[in-house]
Amino acid sequence: MPELPEVEVMRRYFEAAALGQKVERLEFHDKLDKLFKTPREELKSTLEGARFTHTRRIGKYLFIALDKGPWLHLHFGMTGNLLLFRNQDLPKYTRMVFVLDNGDQLAYCDLRKFGVVELTESPERYQAEKKFGPDFLELSLEAFVKALGNKKIALKSALLEQKHFAGIGNWIADEMLFEVGLHPEEKPFKLNQSELTALFQAGQKIIQQAIDKDTHYRDFPEGMFVNYRKKKALHPLFPDSPIEGLVVGGRGSFIVPSKQKLKP
DNA sequence: TTATATGTTCGATA
DNA sequence: TTATCGAACATATA
């Protein structure tokens, strides 16, 4: 579930569930070490006894401050999420559990294990190391235009890079392109100022709407492309142009062909 | 059985 | 050096 809005909703979930709580114990439930970029022993010795004080999100990266020492960084890959539980069986695909001092348990679950759990000195330091840009919600139009400016790669691939601005993922990129009527393989350098502006504003709007609805797709405004794109259902506004699937930059992509055409 | 999945990183190539 | 492309990662489901 994790693009910018999903991670923002997860951040709020984390705050409601665990802020101010102390970690009594950290449990691991995965044989692979892949997820844990910081060794388990170090995670354990740092987190056990520490209290969660505040959180910060940049794009799809979630950072959690402790009352002492480094920050905890969580990334959710393709299939990660957080789930609070108490006196129940371990949620499916649980890889790690924070046992909190109020008796609750917070599970980090991730089916495909593309996620990340690690300690880092600070969000700023991490951002500099990994070289990703500012959060898309904090981006100016000018910076957006400059970032896409002269790129020759597919427009959709450019939107998915985290380097210049962070948080756009596959469904949001498709949604933005649908909304402004651009083809995912369009070349960024061919866009004019008004197209770039429209794209930027569409992104801001889509993300805000998704957050407002807690990323429950069914509650999204009527006509949102995400609710049609994969079913290859007809979009109600385009009954004569069936949704078409293609692969762009290695990612499954969906368009309404009559609305999203390549420029000549 | 084969294709696909809401992400990132790494190696090869230009 | 920088930009771009494709494969790889691990697992489930249609």
Image (cartoon, coloured by chain):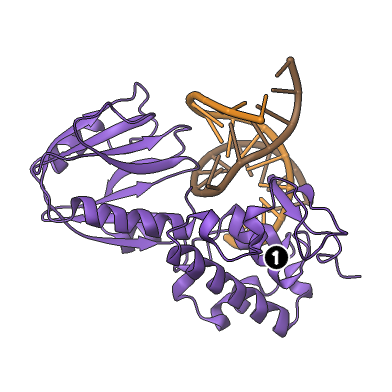
Chain colours: A purple, B brown, C orange
* Residue pictured at 48% horizontal, 32% vertical: A112
Coordinates of residue A36 in the picture (x, y in percent): 33, 35
Which residue sits furthest right? A264
Left or right side of A27 for A171: right
Quadrant location of residue A141? Answer: bottom right
Coordinates of residue B10 in the picture (x, y in percent): 53, 39
Q: Vertical placement of A92 versus A178: above or below?
A: above
Q: Quadrant of the C terminus of chain A?
A: bottom right
Left or right side of A257 for B1: left
Residue picked out by circle 1? A177
Q: Vertical placement of A52 versus A164: above or below?
A: above
Left or right side of A216 for C13: right
Q: Nearer the viewer, residue A82 or A232?
A: A232
* Residue pictured at 61% horizontal, 53% vertical: A170
**Disc 1 is attached to a residue of which chain?**
A
Q: Nearer the viewer, residue A142 or C5?
A: A142
Coordinates of residue A245 in the picture (x, y in percent): 77, 47
Q: Residues within 10 Å of mark 1 (few under 14, many from 20)?
A: many
* Residue pictured at 29% horizontal, 28% vertical: A90
* Residue pictured at 38% horizontal, 57% vertical: A9
Q: Amino acid at mark 1?
A: Leu
Quadrant location of residue A190? Answer: bottom right
Coordinates of residue A183 in the picture (x, y in percent): 78, 63
Quadrant location of residue A192? Answer: bottom right
